[in-house]
Amino acid sequence: MPTPPQIHLGRRWMLASSTLLALPGTALARLTALPGASAPAPLPLSSGSMPPELPAILAAIEARHGGRLGLSVSHLPSGETWGWRASERFEPCST
């Protein structure tokens, strides 16, 4: 029985292919954007607090997609942090 040919995929090949795979995604994102749509307004955040509606928004996203969402927010000038499921561990591919 003949042995199958060896295929060696180097670092350059992997970098080039990942770039080529990302390009159609960026074009598709532009095509699927709704005309006139804009980013949601930022939630107001006073010092040392989180918006009270944020946990409900994150829980709704989890329920809609059937998964867990981890979120960590850092305000660099003040050093304040906030997290959703911050004490839970997630698989490496989900971060």
Image (cartoon, rainbow, N blue to C red):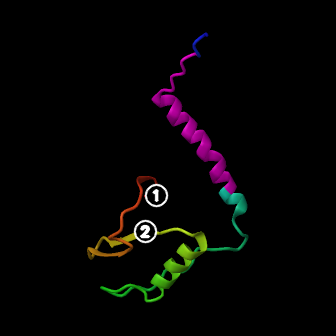
Residue 13: image x %, image y %? Answer: 53, 29
Q: Quadrant of the C terminus?
A: bottom left
- The front one of 34 and 60 is 60
| Residue 9, above or below 47 | above
Specify the quadrant of the image occupied by residue 50.
bottom left
Q: Which residue is mark 1?
A: 94
Q: For residue 86: magenta?
A: no
- Taking the spot 56% from the left edge, 76% from the top edge, the residue there is 63
Label 1: how many Cα within 10 Å (few below 14, some 14–19, many 20+): few
Kind of residue sitting beneath label 2: Gly
Given contact means CB atoms under 8 Å apart, are the residues at marks 1 and 2 in contact?
Answer: yes
Residue at the limit of the structure toward the left, as seen here = 79
Helix, strand or loop: magenta stretch:
helix
Residue 91: image x %, image y %? Answer: 42, 56
- Left or right? Give the position of 21 relative to 91: right
Q: Who comes first in sequence, dot 1 or dot 2?
A: 2
Q: Which residues are magenta?
A: 5-28
Q: Which mark is residue 15?
A: none
Residue at the limit of the structure toward the front, as seen here = 1
Q: For residue 7: magenta?
A: yes
- Taking the spot 30% from the left edge, 70% from the top edge, the residue there is 76
Kind of residue sitting beneath label 1: Ser
Residue 55: image x %, image y %? Answer: 45, 82
- Taking the spot 71% from the left edge, 62% from the top edge, the residue there is 32
State the SS at label 1. Answer: helix
Residue at the limit of the structure toward the top, as seen here = 2
Q: Which mark is residue 70?
A: 2
